[in-house]
Image (spheres, helix red, strand yellow):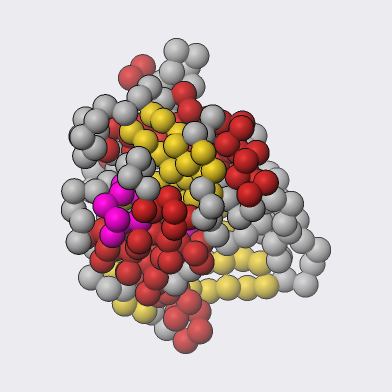
Amino acid sequence: MTTSKTVRIGYIGAGNFSQRRLLPQLKKAPGVELVAIANSTPESSQKVADAFGFRRVAKDWREMVDAKDVDAIVVGTRTAMHPEMCVPVLEAGKHLLTMNAIAGSLEGAQAMLKAAQAKPNLVALVYPGQFYMREEAMMQHLLRDGHVGKVLQVFAYWYSPFFGLASLFEISNRWFGAHTRVFSYRKGFDVPSRGQDDRGRTGRPESNVVLAELASGAPITYIHSTVAGDSALWRYEVYGDLGSVVCYPSGTAAGFAGQAKTGFFGAKISDKEIQPIPVPAEFKSASGELLSVPVEADFIAAIRGEKQPSVAIPRLLDGVRMLEFADGWKRSADSGVWCDLPK
């Protein structure tokens, strides 16, 4: 934890998402000082510094790593650069928040994890994907409260222009536990593409089905499509020995923003149809919306030693597991057989 109440932040690579999401939250957080910014060009750095009140512009990211007046660094650069930057950040004894995905290769992610493990006093987190963050607390409550009992089977459906399996695995891993093996199937279609992501990119027309087995023995099936159309609904279906839960996400993340159905529905094992599940007030804001996970606030609070970050915010070990799962998926896709995952 930091020895002072003020947490002094350095920022490497503040792009559009950082300026839209992270920096406004950090700027308004009590006891946070934005000290130094290093973007790809001096002009870009100065623009961000002026907009958010950074004390200075750094010549390059290495200057920030060596700075004595920086306690924590946010790395918002391209994924491929994360190991090159994050390992020195941790070795310099600075807390770290890096973007998702953790790294461009499993080896790079493992190097970052090794550096973090060598400095266990540091807070080292991966900014989570933007899916199901508002549903996190309610789903954890339902699973912990025994609404479904022992989880027997899970289905995850999503309809983004790009596959994005790691982001869905990130959610499933924290809700349902470790995955032990994986089998993948991909089918392409000779039809026009449908839909674009939030950067205007159009994905190829395809369907992906990923089967996996949880450490509990329960199967989980990931079903992705880029050709299903706007009427298709993102959702998790969870079936247990006592009942079921279906979760339709809300929020502004690309893909499910504005989808026709949101919220939690469920049934007990003897029910004939699912019904809406009331959400307790503790999981809602004053306006009635589901509360999201305060990633930036949790990062700062953890640095101060005030609380542990939400389990919805991946640690570096979680980031390594994401890439191990993605690697297993690729090996299965290439070989056509089940692939065991590291324990």
Judged left or right of residue 331, residue 93 is left
In the picture shown, does residue 21 fall above or below 167? above
Q: Residue at x 43, y 66 (%)?
A: 84
Residue at the extreme top? 286
Q: What stretch is highlighted in magenta?
A: 89-103
Q: Which residue is drawn at 31% across and 73% down?
A: 341
Location of residue 32 in the rendering, given as x and y in whole percent from the top left corner: 38, 29
In the picture shown, does residue 23 fall above or below 155? above
Location of residue 265 in the rendering, given as x and y in whole percent from the top left corner: 44, 33
- In front of the other: 212 or 50: 50
Quarter of the image containing the N terminus?
top left
Location of residue 185 in the rendering, given as x and y in whole percent from the top left corner: 53, 74
Q: Residue at x 27, y 46 (%)?
A: 123
In the picture shown, does residue 151 fall above or below 23? below
Q: Can residue 133 be seen in this view?
A: no
- In front of the other: 54 or 76: 54
Q: Can residue 116 be seen in this view?
A: yes
Q: Which residue is drawn at 50% across and 14% down?
A: 287
Identify the image quadrant of residue 283. top left
Residue 101 belongs to magenta span? yes
